[in-house]
């Protein structure tokens, strides 16, 4: 049985990880796709669980051999989803969600038009800017860079199937559940 592919994207700082975590704990039949990345593991991240960590050379080799369904460069590192991994999950009838950036999401849609793209956005750009500034963790230049990426992502999200405003976690999770249930028919 072939299943639908759900792709969730959202700007960093918008809380998409929290929304997905809450969704997955309520819907254990769904699995999150495991991506490949060239970035170093963060503390506590495990190879083959959080990501498949690989070198830039190995990643480029996979690009050359057309092994990725989609890939993108994000903040100086490469991220990609292996075609074989997704096809195997779909053939096995697994409900699968990809949590990837907007560039990758649009590549997936081109290759698999039946994929459902969902964008999680902040209540407003002002709200996100306030949150970024309130953290006091980035300098002015970094904040501006991040806000520019956010604007680009919101622009790309115009081509997504659904948008969820994350102003309230429970509401955002319920909306995600409704969208997915509706698409599954
Ligand atoms: P992080 O380094 O914080 O884990 O992820 C950085 C960004 O890369 C996030 O926006 C995340 O959604 C995105 N990302 C993770 N895996 C993939 C992937 O396989 N493909 C693409 N295009 N983006 C990914």
Image (cartoon, rainbow, N blue to C red):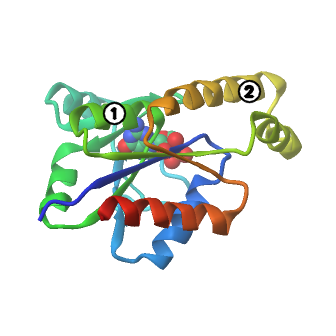
Decide: is 8 above or below 104.
below
Q: List x then y, in percent, for residue 117.
A: 41, 44
Left or right: 155 as drawn, with respect to 54: right
Q: SS at mark 2?
A: helix
Labels 2 and 1 touching (C-beta < 8 A): no
Query: Quick one: SS at disc 1?
Result: strand
Residue at image point 34% right, 37% down: 55
- From the viewer's perspective, tell me whether residue 126 is left or right of residue 177: right
The residue at 13%/30% (across/down) is: 65
Instruction: State whether residue 161 appears in this view.
Output: yes
> Which residue is located at x 53 percent, y 67 percent?
21
**Where 17 sits versus 124, above or below?**
below
Q: Which mark is residue 142?
A: 2
Quadrant of the frame with the C terminus: bottom left
| Residue pointed to by mark 1 | 71
Q: Position of residue 32 (x, y in %)?
A: 38, 61
Q: Is residue 117 above or below residue 176?
A: above
The residue lying at 84 percent from left, 45 percent from top is 135
Q: Earlier in the sequence, mark 2 or mark 1?
A: 1
- Taking depth in this image into account, of 116 and 77 the one nearest to the observer is 116
Quarter occupied by the N terminus = bottom left
Q: Position of residue 174 (x, y in %)?
A: 56, 68
Viewed as shown, does residue 56 lie left or right of 91?
right
């Amino acid at each position: 049985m072939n299943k639908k592919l759900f792709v969730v994207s959202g700007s960093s700082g918008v809380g998409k990880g929290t929304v997905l975590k809450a969704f997955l704990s309520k819907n254990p039949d769904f699995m999150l796709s495991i991506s490949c990345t060239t970035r170093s593991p963060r503390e506590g991240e495990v190879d083959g669980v959080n990501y498949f960590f690989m070198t830039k050379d190995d990643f480029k080799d996979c690009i050359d051999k057309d092994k990725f369904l989609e890939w993108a460069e994000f903040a100086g590192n490469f991220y990609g989803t292996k075609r074989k991994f997704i096809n195997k999950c779909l053939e096995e009838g697994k409900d699968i969600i990809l949590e990837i950036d907007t560039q990758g999401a649009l590549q997936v849609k081109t290759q698999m038009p039946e994929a459902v793209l969902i964008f999680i956005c902040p209540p407003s750009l002002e709200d996100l800017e306030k949150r970024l500034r309130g953290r006091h963790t980035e300098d002015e230049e970094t904040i501006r860079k991040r806000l520019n990426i956010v604007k680009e992502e919101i622009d790309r999200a115009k081509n997504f199937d659904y948008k969820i405003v994350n102003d309230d976690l429970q509401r955002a999770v319920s909306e995600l559940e409704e969208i997915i249930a509706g698409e599954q028919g």
